[in-house]
Image (cartoon, rainbow, N blue to C red):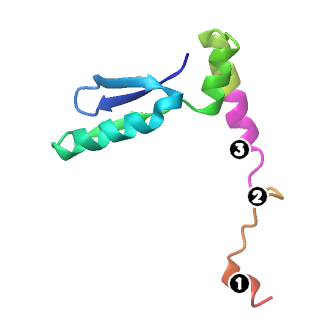
Amino acid sequence: MPKVRVLDQQSGQTLFECSIQETEKAYQFAAQMEAIGLDIKVLVPTLSQTLSQSLGLSREQQATYENSLDEEIESHGGSCCFDDIDDSKKALN
């Protein structure tokens, strides 16, 4: 099962780990660690990582899947879903 991890940026050590359902706890812990001066990073698994793990894909299959997603996203630059024209310029047209 994918886990949310809180890492110390300097050492790379995992300081806290919890399930995705408890993500808020990870952010609360990170805030406490930052308050005492640690440089913290919160790693939350992406949807594609969670799906890959739940399907039981091997590391190689996961990498292939991630690469295919990246290629798919890159091939949709300027797609119909996003308008590259600034809203202030639309008013002039």
Q: Secondary structure at mark 2?
A: loop
Q: State the extent of the magenta-drawn residues as a range.
A: 67-78
User: Measuring 77% from the left and 48% from the top, which residue is drawn there?
Assistant: 76
Q: Tell me the residue that label 1 is attached to.
A: 89
> Can you give x and y, in whole percent of width and height, for residue 53 in the image?
62, 16
Q: Tell me the residue that label 2 is attached to.
A: 78
In terms of sequence position, does the residue under pointer 2 or pointer 1 come before the other?
2
In terms of sequence position, does the residue under pointer 3 or pointer 1 come before the other?
3
Q: Secondary structure at mark 3?
A: helix
> Can you give x and y, in whole percent of width and height, for residue 88 in the image?
67, 84
- Left or right: where 26 falls relative to 85: left
> Can you give x and y, in whole percent of width and height, for residue 25 in the image?
39, 35
User: Measuring 23% from the left and 43% from the top, which residue is drawn there?
Assistant: 34
Amino acid type assigned to the residue bearing label 1 in the image:
Lys
Among the 4 quarters of the image, the one containing residue 63: top right
Q: CA distance from mark 2 to mark 1?
A: 17 Å
The reply to whether callout 3 and callout 1 are in contact (CB within 8 Å) is no
Name of the residue lying farthest toward the bottom: 92
Q: Is residue 77 above or below residue 18?
A: below
Q: Is residue 28 above or below residue 6?
A: below
Q: Tell me the residue that label 3 is attached to.
A: 74
- Looking at the rendered image, the quarter that the N terminus falls into is top right
Amino acid type assigned to the residue bearing label 3 in the image:
Glu
> Can you give x and y, in whole percent of width and height, for residue 39 in the image?
24, 40
- Left or right: where 2 falls relative to 12: right
- Left or right: where 78 falls relative to 66: right
